[in-house]
Amino acid sequence: MPDIVAIGECMIELFSDEPIGQASTFNKSYAGDTNNVLHMASRLGISCGYITRVAEDPFGDYLLGAWQANSIDASASKKVPGFTAVHFITLLEDGEREFAFYRKGSAASTMVPEDLDNDYIGESRILHVSGIIQAVSPSCRSTVLHAVQICKERGVLVSYDTNLRPSMWSAREARDALEEVLPYIDVVFTSYPEETSAVLGVQSEEEAVDFFRDRGVGTVSVTSGKNGAIVADSKTVLKANAIAPNGVSDTTGAGDAFVGGFLHCLVQDMGIGSGLRWGIASAGLKVAGRGGIASQPSRASVERVIEDVEVIEG
């Protein structure tokens, strides 16, 4: 069975260099936050599996083929009637990103708790989920809750990324969904300042760490873009600045690359200090290229810059 299993929604990504309304051609790829995390961990040598639904359409076949090509096990995913979600993206001249999403009612949004295989989840080391898949539909939210309950029964670590998307639901709804699964979370990822302020109601990285520590979460990571990240367990707080050895082209999926690098270390019991280094290095190399997956670095590339990440006690 895979060491890391994730539940999520993977969408077809159509990218253009021009504003969406003016573009005449788009390049096809695929993306989704938990999907991106698995790809990064897989590139670093960890066995990974994805739980989702894909449509009985050409895009569904494309996703299944892409996962197989990238050593992501999809044997626990289902192919169902319907359509595969699509999003359009472009990078504007000022560096901002423009998105358009077509996902309501997609195949992935129809996931239900009955889709889950208890043994597939229960024999993994880590289950990774996020606020995004909870927001996709009520049945997806129920599926996530059932999955973390399986983990509690089977002794599997639960990793959760708050990943707030205001276009999908309100901060209040996101907080309610977080509270629903919080008793089951062992490792949490959140970002400062937007998510920590809107979802947690705190105004600093340190307060975010305390928020989760006080609620029994064993490992907390707070990322802050170009300012790096803080990670903590019950005894230690560590900090590291961001790096960008090859410059910054596109920050899409940088946080997911960080999570993939961090979880890669947890699977191997390397500790939060190593997780911080590998996470920072993975994200710092990813931002040099476009796309959430295509520009993710190889293990060899990450290993070459690990020593550039300076970790200090906070």
Image: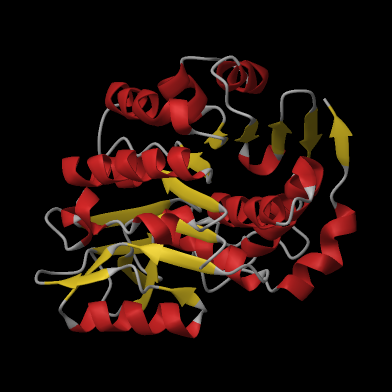
Residue 185 in view in this figure? yes
Question: Could you tell me how many numbered marks the image carries?
Answer: 0
Q: Is residue 290 visible?
A: no
The answer to which of 262 and 301 lies nearer the viewer is: 262
Q: Is residue 225 above or below residue 66?
A: above
Q: Is residue 179 left or right of residue 170?
A: right
The x, y position of residue 85, in whole percent, is 22, 64
Say which quadrant the C terminus sits in.
top right
Relative vertical location of residue 146 with respect to residue 38 in this rendering, above or below: above
User: Is 237 above or below relative to 124?
Assistant: above
Q: In front: 179, or 125? A: 125
Q: What residue sits 38% from the left and 38% below the top? A: 149
User: Could you tell me which residue is drawn at 51 percent across and 68 percent down?
Assistant: 1
Question: Which residue lies at the image location 63% right of the left edge and 32% below the top edge?
Answer: 220
Q: Nearer the viewer, residue 133 or 282?
A: 133
User: Which picture quadrant has residue 119?
Assistant: bottom left
183 or 171, nearer to the observer: 183
Q: Position of residue 259 (x, y in %)?
A: 59, 50
